[in-house]
Amino acid sequence: MSVTRQMIEAQAPPPLQARPWSTARVSGLAAMALWLVVGVGIILFLVAEWDPEKIDRYAPRYFSGLWVTLTLVGISIVLGALVSIPVTAGRMSSSRWASVPAYCYVYFFRGTPLIAQLFLIYYGLGEFRPQLQAIGLWGFFRDPWNCAILAFTLNTAAYQAEILRGALQSVPKGQFEGAQALGLTRLQTYRKIILPQAMIVALRPYGNEIILMVKGSAIVAIITVFDLFGETRRAYSRTFDFQTYIWAAIFYLIIVEALRNLWNLLEDRLTRHLKR
Amino acid sequence: MEQTLTLLSFGPDGWGDQIASGVLVTVSLALATLPLGLVVGFLLALAKQSDEKALKMAAEIYTTIFRGLPELLTLFLVYFGLQIGIREAVAALGFESQIEINSFLAGMIALGVVFSAFASEVFLSAFRAIPAGQYEGGYALGLGKVQTMIKIILPQLIRIALPGLGNLWMILLKETALVSVIGLPDILRQAGIAARVSKEAFLFFGTACLLFLVLAILSSIVIRYIERSVERSEVRV
């Protein structure tokens, strides 16, 4: 039998081990140092090249370009959402005559580059000028802005149709049956039961699609629409000053990050009943 | 109809040769970018899941920037930025030179950087799908860190990441069309030249779209084949 005669004194905790200089730590610090150098370098460059005259002249143009980009994306997304509804209906239809054309539409617009679609519409349809004039549509297709809206709408409609289809199919079948058992009409079923559930699933993909459109919209600069990127190119071709591109990058990063954070907030808010 | 066929034919009267060479350029640019993007993306994913805060943050900054910038802008930043940067660096050394960056190289770097930013997210979510027991099992067998990664984690990682990487490849293939803007003679640029000379824009841009579609279909066949061959090891009765 052992008897404790003496309590062990409370000990000091073991001394903190210095964190070892592992490869990960060294490379991490080196990478951060590199980013710091790049960041400070860009700021110094912008400060050194700061020219009030240039800012006065080009800042309003950048903001008008920004507005063009945002309206272009906004209009295309909304029109695309409208076009995507019949496409989704066609895609989910059990009739071959509806589902095959819808499938081909989606496959074409998702399988080819947006820039090629834009060229096809702007330059390609320009070739049918006499025919378009005959039916009075030439005025529409002559304007690059209209062509850009048309190309973007058709493109995003294909992507949004896939998002919508995926979301609708994620709603269990029992929900339809339940609604039917309650005697709801088809429209009521969709409006009150299916869509609220489907839209939560579709929320994140829709957000990604908007961000993709904002980024993709830069290509309209090539068909002479002066969006943010178009204004940037014009400013660069007049000044040969590289800071024009850096300002564009800052603008785009702000838009995309703002959208991303907005979407996170929105998702947090709309899915709060699903969290435990 | 006959005129259309002549325009698309090979030989001195048609644009077939030029467009075929454009297809070759598009495919080789995409294939050259892929390994660069995959390796950098994998390293970024490793950095993002490391315990080292600085490393993690550096990788996050990289992804935030290159996922947020339009691809076209990244391309221009690389194309003009590298040229100016090299000129300044050479001037600082006391030489004077006019170095032109090859548009293929600029496209490869820009697309590779964007690809790696997206690929790192795919790899990261694949890493998270692998249970910690797999690492522990590897260490228990006496394998080192690198060996565990290569022999145990990587084969599973590829299988999980493959669908995501397949999507990224499709996006990459389409993004190569942007490099035509800085003068790379790819499908779209050759089609544009043909369209301007022959005044048959719809025909040639339509052909370009169809060629991209064919490339997409071929890729999806290849990706399905790879998926099947990787999955073979998973299902064993």
Image: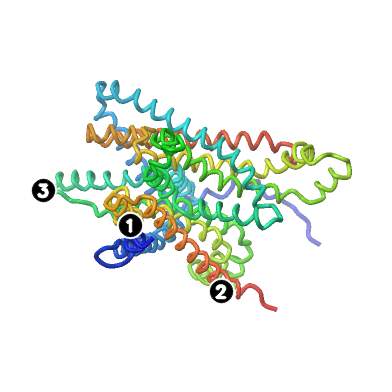
Whether pointer 1 and pointer 2 mark residues with C-beta atoms closer than 8 Å, the reply is: no
Q: Amino acid at mark 1?
A: Asp
Residue B62 rendering spot, x and y as whole percentages: 42, 46
Q: Which mark is residue A47?
A: none
Q: Is A202 located above or below residue B216 in the figure?
A: above
Q: Which mark is residue B95?
A: 3
Query: Which residue is disc 1 drawn over?
Result: B186
Q: Is B162 located above or below residue B141 in the figure?
A: above
Residue B69 rendering spot, x and y as whole percentages: 42, 42
Whether pointer 3 and pointer 1 mark residues with C-beta atoms closer than 8 Å, the reply is: no
Q: Amino acid at mark 2?
A: Ser
Q: Is B101 located above or below residue B234 in the figure?
A: above
Q: Residue at x 48, y 30 (%)?
A: A71
Residue A28 vs residue A9: left or right?
left
Few, some or many residues within 10 Å of mark 2 (<14, 14–19, 20+): few
Looking at the image, is mark 3 or mark 2 earlier in the sequence? 3
Q: Is A154 located above or below residue A100 in the figure?
A: above
Looking at the image, is mark 3 or mark 1 earlier in the sequence? 3
Q: Which mark is residue B229?
A: 2
Q: Are marks 1 and 2 on the same chain?
A: yes
Q: Residue at x 39, y 34 (%)?
A: A143
**Which quadrant, please, contains the C terminus of chain B?**
bottom right
SS of the residue at dot 3? loop
Q: CA distance from mark 3 to mark 1?
A: 34 Å
Q: Residue at x 31, y 56 (%)?
A: B190
Q: Nearer the viewer, mark 3 or mark 2?
A: 2
Q: Amino acid at mark 3?
A: Phe
Residue B59 rendering spot, x and y as whole percentages: 45, 48
